Amino acid sequence: MHMRSFIQRARVAVLKPLTQYDALARLMFDIKLLLLSLRRRDLVLLITTTKTGTHYLRFLLAYYILLLEAKENGGSVEVDHGLVDRFFPNSWHTSYTGVLPRIAPDPRIKKLGIVDIPRSHMPLRVAPWCKTRIIHTYRDLDDQAVVSWFTKYACDHRLSSEFSTIQDLMDVTRDANQLQLDSFKNNGRNRINCLRLSFESIHQKPEKCLALVISWLGLEPNLALCKEAAFLTRQTPSVLVGGGEKWHRFPSQHIDQKILNEFIAEYTQTGAIGVAKVLGVQK
């Protein structure tokens, strides 16, 4: 196990910097697809800014798949806070460039007509992602900063010293987050099929957003199952504010649960939409 960990760290150190260059990233992506016997149309990339509905959308899709199976075979679907970790275990920037091994997703994802939905947080990469379908989620950047601060930095003993205030976090991350947001605007070009979803729309009408994604994938959505998938997803509270990370769903010794849970509980109904204004955060 120690040797495997060492090899993986070495691969990350050597290969990950290469993915910053578009030409090399495209070559690495193509090679990985060839080795996996996959085509670009077999994937949908979920490229998001952090805390903008990445987990929310993946829970909706995973529950929808299980509900389809239950409808076909009988049975019921229970709340499962670990669902996304099994259905969508990969990130594009490591799993599909050879930096780290790809983890096999739950094969039932093929009910959506695809084999994987790897995620990543980065600006639009035109050269590597040419002829690829992309879902991009986004939200107001002030709200995004507040949610990031409370659900990541303020409650994690390992990270709490990195930023003293929300404003400190905003000052450091705003330019990069703005670049990510702007890069996906006016993107009807370069043979990239991109569906953009705001966090506000996902939170306020999750069943309609899910039905939209299903239609975009070329399938006929079952609206009753979309509503049921939305109900099941709402049982994992942290996704409702734009969180959903594993340490939200499964308590960790590094996390101050009081800080985390109080924030989630206070803003579950609103999704922390407009929270920056509520708290008086300044740009």
Image (tube, grey):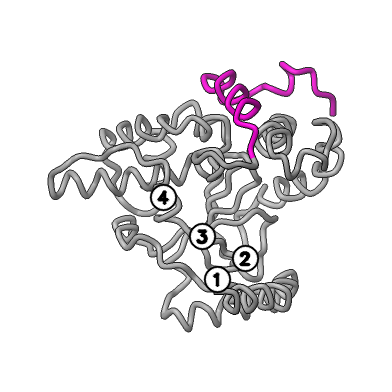
Residue 42 is marked as none
Residue on which the image places disc 3? 118
Q: Residue drawn 37% across and 33% down?
A: 230
* Residue 123 found in image quarter: bottom right
Q: Amino acid at mark 1?
A: Tyr
Precedes in sequence: disc 2 or disc 4: 2
- Give, as a single range, the part of the protein colored magenta: 255-283
Please tell me the numbered disc located at residue 96.
1
Tell me the CA gap for discs 2 and 4: 24 Å
Q: Are marks 1 and 2 in contact (CB under 8 Å)?
A: yes
Residue type, numbered disc 3? Pro
The disc labelled 4 sits on which kind of residue?
Trp
Q: Establish if 188 lies above or below 145.
A: below
Q: Can you name the residue that lies furthest to the left here?
A: 74
The image shows residue 137 at horizontal and vertical percentages of 58, 44
Residue 93 marker: 2
Instruction: Mark 1: give few (<14), some (14-19) or many (20+) Cα within 10 Å.
Output: many
Proximity of marks 4 and 1: CB atoms separated by less than 8 Å? no
Q: Is residue 231 above or below residue 24?
A: above
